[in-house]
Image: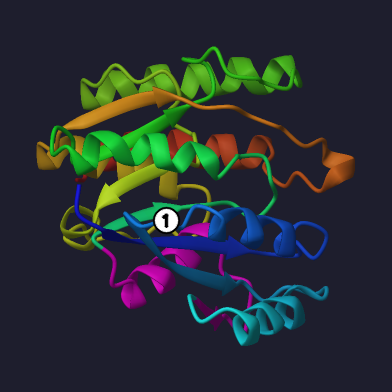
Amino acid sequence: MSACLVSVIVPCFNEESTLETLVERVLALRDRELDLELILVDDASRDRSPEIARSLMDRHKEIRVLTHERNRGKGAAIRTGLACATGDYIAVQDADLEYDPQDLKRLLGPLRRDVADVVIGSRFLTSEEHRVLYFWHYVGNKFLTLCSNMMTDLNLTDMECCYKVFKAGLIKGLRLREDRFGFEPEIVAKIARSGARVYEMGISYHGRTYAQGKKIGWRDGLQALYCILRYKIFP
């Protein structure tokens, strides 16, 4: 395969403890066939995340840092990153180390072979290592994925998974509007409607506890359910 450029968008909000390690792990993916463009979008963090991001940008030419003056949410951060992304493929990477960047290389495979337009990771369709946490989160995720599948006629196992890797032309051609965690059901609904070729692959997962900084809660689940219905009824 010829070399390709992958834009990795990293939304960041108060991730000073993990941001530098995450960036080094993503940059380690570079090889003769894969160039990287790493776009860090700081969503008005109140800790040292902006300072760390700027320091990383000074050390690595592949990194670009964008900032929000007020906290707007993950979806808004992704849109900010998309506006500046120039890669052949675009991936979203959380900054909290729950997801292993090494999995991105595998997810890129079907895209580079041109059998898929988007590849979605699954924390459940996997034989990889997986931290065991939060039974009711699991139940809620399965319920939201089921509802999403009913609306989109896809058969995903993990609609809410962060790891979604796209051909750039696909995601840049979608009109996205959700600012917060509603991004996940919105993007899945619009991908399904576009007729894109969707593949799913198992990934490893190193979940965090709330004490370690996990942010998603039951209100985000309600918002996701609203978005699932909204983008079916009012596409």
Residue 26 on image: x %, y %: 56, 55
* Category of crowding for the residue at label 1, using alpha-carbon neighbours closer than 10 angstroms: few (below 14), some (14–19), many (at least 20): few
Question: Which color scheme did the rendering employ for the protein?
Answer: rainbow
Residue at label 1? Answer: 31
Q: Which residue is at a point 66% across and 23% down the rendered structure image?
A: 137
- Mark 1 lies on a secondary structure that is loop
Direction from residue 192 to residue 68 in the image, left or right? right
User: Which quadrant of the structure image shows residue 194?
Assistant: top left
Residue at the right extreme? Answer: 211
Direction from residue 89 to residue 162 in the image, left or right? right
Q: Is residue 233 visible?
A: no
The vertical placement of 25 against 7, above or below, is above
Q: Which residue is at a point 25% across and 40% down the rendered structure image?
A: 118
> Magenta region: which residues?
63-87
Residue 54 on image: x %, y %: 67, 84
Q: Is residue 118 visible?
A: yes
Can you say which quadrant of the picture contains the C terminus?
Answer: top left
Direction from residue 27 to residue 45 in the image, left or right? right
The vertical placement of 196 against 146, above or below, is below
Residue at the left extreme? Answer: 195
Q: Which residue is at a point 73% across and 22% down the rendered structure image?
A: 131
The vertical placement of 94 against 123, above or below, is below
User: Which quadrant of the structure image shows residue 14?
Assistant: bottom right
The amino acid type, in three-letter code, at marker 1 is: Asp
- Residue 78 colored magenta? yes
